[in-house]
Image (cartoon, rainbow, N blue to C red):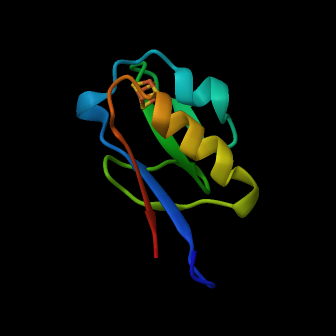
Amino acid sequence: MKENTQMKVSIEQDYCTGDGLCADLCPDVFAMNDEGLAHVKEAGGLAGTGQRVEVDQAMEEGVLDAQAQCAGECIYVSMD
Ligand code: SF4
């Protein structure tokens, strides 16, 4: 991994099954909305569909774990 890379994560709600796994595994990063779909948390609320949010380094492992287990395959991680 290059130095100065920053993990970012987003969710496409269209494919979220609503099982809540990501919010269970990594509640500091993911939360469910009122309709039972997962979102990435951001300061002051929930990120929009596809909105990329920076991940604290301490949360990276949990995010990758959630991505690997996501039934909807709708958690997207990038490093840039
Ligand atoms: S793990 Fe995937 S399918 Fe399950 S709630 Fe999270 S985003 Fe939705």
- Residue at 64% x, 53% y is 60
Q: Residue furthest right?
A: 58
- Residue at 31% x, 46% y is 49
Q: Would you say 24 lies left or right of 33 here?
A: right
How many numbered dots are placed on residues in this image? 0
Q: Residue furthest front?
A: 1
Q: Would you say 60 lies left or right of 46 here?
A: right
Q: Residue furthest left?
A: 14
Query: Could you say where residue 21 lies in the image, as x and y percent from the top left?
Result: 54, 22
- Residue at 33% x, 37% y is 74
| 61 vs 21: above or below | below
- Residue at 63% x, 84% y is 3
Camera-side residue: 75 or 18? 75
- Looking at the rendering, which quadrant does residue 4 occupy? bottom right
Query: Could you say where residue 42 lies in the image, as x and y percent from the top left?
Result: 57, 54
Query: Could you say where residue 67 lies in the image, as x and y percent from the top left?
Result: 47, 39
Q: Would you say 49 lies left or right of 67 here?
A: left
Indicate the quadrant of ligand 1 in the picture.
top left
| 72 vs 39: above or below | above
| 11 vs 53: above or below | above
- Looking at the rendering, which quadrant does residue 38 occupy? top left
